[in-house]
Amino acid sequence: MDVLFRSIGENILDPNAAFTAQDSLQAIDGAESSLTTASHFFDPPFRDSVASRAPSRAGTPMLSDGLMSPPPRRITVRPSALPQLPDVSNIDISCDPSAEYVVIISMYEVHNDRIYDLLTPAVKSGATKEVRRRPLLFKSTELSPDRKVVAGLRKVICSSYNEALTVVETGLQERRVTGTGSNSVSSRSHGFFVFEVKKRTRSRRPSLWEGNKFTIVDLAGSERAREAKTAGATLAEAGKINESLMYLGQCLQTQSEAASSSKASHRSNV
C-alpha cells in the first residue's frame, strides 16, 4: 500500500473530492456495496452510538433508557510505527498524470461456510437480543449477471496510506480468533482483503471510472483436534476449516491437471 499511495501521489482524490465522487463510484459497483469515505467511516454515524453511551456502575455500556447496549465498534488508533520491512522506498508504480485516482478497501471473512463483512459492526437481533453480524450472499447481481460476487459489502474510499492502514487494522480486529492447544491466537475463518484502484481522466465532464482489483487471502490453518485440544463450537469450526481447505486443494489440483493436459495437447499438435 505504501508503494501504491506514494506512486499515485497528488493524483489521488482528497477527502472532499472523494465524498463528491461517491455517487459515480457507486453507480459502477457491481456488488451492491455501500461506499463511504474513510473520514466518514471513522466518524458518526459509526461512532455516535459509542459517544452517546455512558458506562454503568459495573462498567457495562447502557443506553439512555437503561437497556443493555451491544458492544461498541472497536476504534482503531493509527499505528505509531508504520511497517518498515521489506524496504520499498525505491519502488514506484507508473501512473497517468492526467488522471485522478481512488483506492477502495473492503474486507470480509468466511466463517462456518458463511460470509461476514469485517467493516460492518455487529448489531443486536430484535428477536433473540443477541449481538451478531448479518451474513452476506455470494450471488449474481444486476450489474454483474455473468459472475457471482460477495454482495452488500461496505467499501471504504481511502485518500492516504495512513487512512488505508487504519481501515485494515480496524477490520482485522473484527476477525474471529480464539485460543487452542496449538495456537493462542488461532484464526477461525478465512480472511479476504480487497484493494480496488480506480482512475478516470480529469476534465470538465469526468469520464467513467476504470481500474483493477487486488485480493489477498489469509487462509486459516488446518487443525487436528487431538493436538489443538478443541471441543464444542471450536471443534466444529476446525471441521469447517479443514473441509474448505480440502475443497480448495481439489480445485487447485483440477486446475493444475487441466493446465498440464492443455500443454501436452498443444505440444502433440505442434
Image: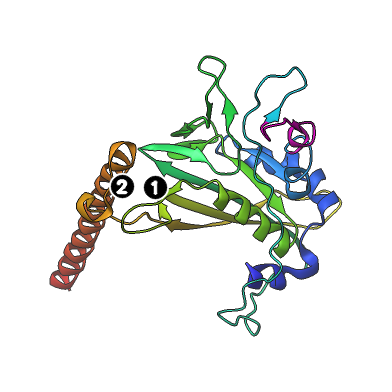
Q: Where is residue 232 in the image (x, y as percent from the top left)?
A: 29, 36
Labels 2 and 1 touching (C-beta < 8 A): yes
Report if residue 211 is visible in the image. Answer: no
Left or right side of 133 for 17: right
Q: Is residue 224 above or below residue 113?
A: below
The colour scheme applied to this rendered structure is rainbow
Where is residue 253 drawn, in percent x and y? 21, 58
The amino acid on which the numbered mark 2 sits, given as a three-letter code, is Ile
Residue to which mark 1 is pinned = 188
Q: Is residue 182 magenta?
A: no
Q: Which residue lies furthest to the bottom in this view?
A: 90
**Quarter of the C terminus within the rendering:** bottom left
- The residue beneath circle 2 is 241
Task: Tell me: residue 33, above or below residue 200.
Answer: above
- SS for tag 2? helix
Horizontal side, residue 38 vs residue 132: left or right: right
Q: Residue drawn at (53%, 32%), measured in percent from left and top?
A: 133
Q: Does residue 233 appear anywhere in the picture?
A: yes
The front one of 173 and 246 is 173
In this picture, which residue range is highlighted in magenta?
47-60
Residue 194: x and y, percent? Answer: 54, 53
Determine the residue located farthest toward the left in the rendered image: 268
Task: Tell me the amino acid under the disc marked 1.
Answer: Arg
Residue 92: quarter of image: bottom right
Which is more toward the observer, 263 or 139? 139
Alpha carbon of mark 2 to alpha carbon of mark 1: how far? 7 Å
Identify the image quadrant of the N terminus.
bottom right
Instruction: Decide which of 84, 97 is in the foreground and name it.
Output: 84
Left or right: residue 248 versus residue 82 is: left
